[in-house]
Amino acid sequence: MQNRSYEFQDPTHFGTGAIGDPGERVFYLQAGDATGYISLKLEKQQVVALAQFLRGVLDDLPAAPANSPSADLRSPVEPEWVVGQIAVGVDEADAEIVVMIEEMVPFDEEDDGDDVELLDDVNTGATMRVQINSAQAAAFVAQADVLVSKGRPPCRLCGQPEDPGGHACPRLN
């Protein structure tokens, strides 16, 4: 069964958040409008990468208004699907950013590679396309920064996250 795709041309919400304790958090991306919102599950590294890219995009766009919308998670959080790839496009003339999110499609481990598949037969998964403005992008970046700061502190030697119960640092072996 294929998951549903979504498109938000004028979203009222674009945000991120995490549920759980550091080291066990589950990260989400949300987008929505007056009719409702959609939650997608993703990795912390994807949130960080998207925020870093948006930060760079914002440097090339007119300054966002000081009143940024909320980028917090809205409840309830029920993920529609898991994020695979994220692509970002910029319309500098209209100061809009298009975020294209693709569903992670599981690899068929039983496929031995001997069969040639036509592109029409490949399961591409669902997508979500969100057209955001610079204020929404700035709010997302700020929220991502807060999320990262609440994570486990990095090891001073290897940079990997330290657990409260100890850390097996590879540089000490």
Image: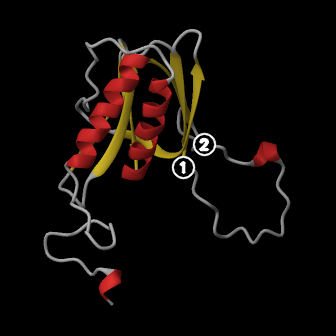
Residue ID at (20%, 69%): 163
Is residue 15 visible in this depiction of the protein? no
Q: Say few, some or many: other residues with alpha carbon within 10 Å of mark 2 (under 14 / 14 to 19 / 20 or more).
A: some
Q: How many marks?
A: 2
Tell me the quadrant of the picture where the N terminus can be found: top right
Along the line of sight, the residue nearer the viewer: 42 or 159: 159
Residue ID at (29%, 73%): 157
Tell me the quadrant of the picture where the C terminus can be found: bottom left
In this picture, is 104 found above or below 17?
below
Q: Which corner quadrant of the image does residue 77 belong to?
A: top left
**Residue 20 rendering spot, x and y as whole percentages:** 20, 52
In this picture, is 73 found above or below 98?
below
**Looking at numbered disc 1 in the image, what kind of residue is underneath it?**
Met
Classify residue 128 as left or right of residue 165. right
Q: Say few, some or many: other residues with alpha carbon within 10 Å of mark 1 (under 14 / 14 to 19 / 20 or more).
A: some
Alpha carbon separation for disc pair 2 and 1: 7 Å
**Looking at numbered disc 2 in the image, what kind of residue is underneath it?**
Gly
Along the line of sight, the residue nearer the viewer: 50 or 18: 50
Q: Which mark is residue 125?
A: 2
In this picture, is 40 found above or below 20?
above
Task: Give the structural element (helix, strand or loop) at label 2.
Answer: loop
Name the residue tied to disc 1.
104
**Residue 30 rendering spot, x and y as whole percentages:** 36, 31
Along the line of sight, the residue nearer the viewer: 34 or 57: 57
